[in-house]
Amino acid sequence: AGMLGMLQWYHLRAGDYRRALQFAERSAAVAISVNDHNLTALTHSLLGISRHLLGDLSGARVELDAALRHESGDAAGRVFYFGFDHLTLANATLAT
């Protein structure tokens, strides 16, 4: 799921938000199969950010809120992109 998350970020940075959402959805499918709270939070964050950039604000809100609910509190398990962890990015996206 981590590699899929990196592909999601690649497509976000390239401006291909629909493709980024596809990778976020694939990452979420992996997260469901392993039942890991940090991974689940990460994938909800990826889905929320992708949906936000596509203009699906209500769908983004659902995913970003879910990311924050699934947070385990274990900072060691968080994934960092460009100096930010996925929960910081989820909060920043909610703020916008």
Image (cartoon, rainbow, N blue to C red):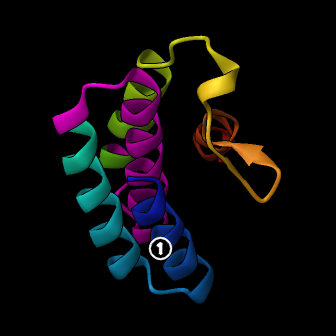
Prevailing secondary structure of the magenta residues:
helix
Q: Position of residue 33 (x, y in %)?
A: 16, 37
Query: Which residues, given as a range, are shown in magenta?
Result: 33-58
Q: Answer left or right for 74 relative to 62.
A: right
Name which residue lies at 24% across and 48% down: 30
Q: Is residue 23 above or below residue 70?
A: below
Name which residue lies at 19% across and 36% down: 32
To which quarter of the image does residue 26 belong? bottom left
Q: Position of residue 11 (x, y in %)?
A: 50, 81
Q: Is residue 2 above or below residue 10?
A: above
Q: Is residue 42 above or below residue 35?
A: below
Please give the residue where the numbered disc 1 appears in the rendered image: 7
To which quarter of the image does residue 63 belong? top left
Q: Amino acid at mark 1?
A: Leu
Determine if residue 31 is in view. yes
Determine if residue 61 is in view. no
Name which residue lies at 19% across and 49% down: 29
Relative to the observer, which residue lies in front, 61 or 3?
Answer: 3
Quick check: is 91 in the magenta stretch?
no
Q: Is residue 68 above or below residue 12?
A: above
To which quarter of the image does residue 89 belong? top right
Crowding near pointer 1: few (<14 within 10 Å), some, many (20+)? some
Most distant residue in the top direction? 73
Q: Secondary structure at mark 1?
A: helix
Q: Answer left or right for 92 relative to 72.
A: right
Relative to the observer, which residue lies in front, 85 or 74?
Answer: 74
Quick check: is 50 in the magenta stretch?
yes
- Please count the marks in the image: 1
Q: Position of residue 41 (x, y in %)?
A: 44, 31
Q: Answer left or right for 77 relative to 42.
A: right
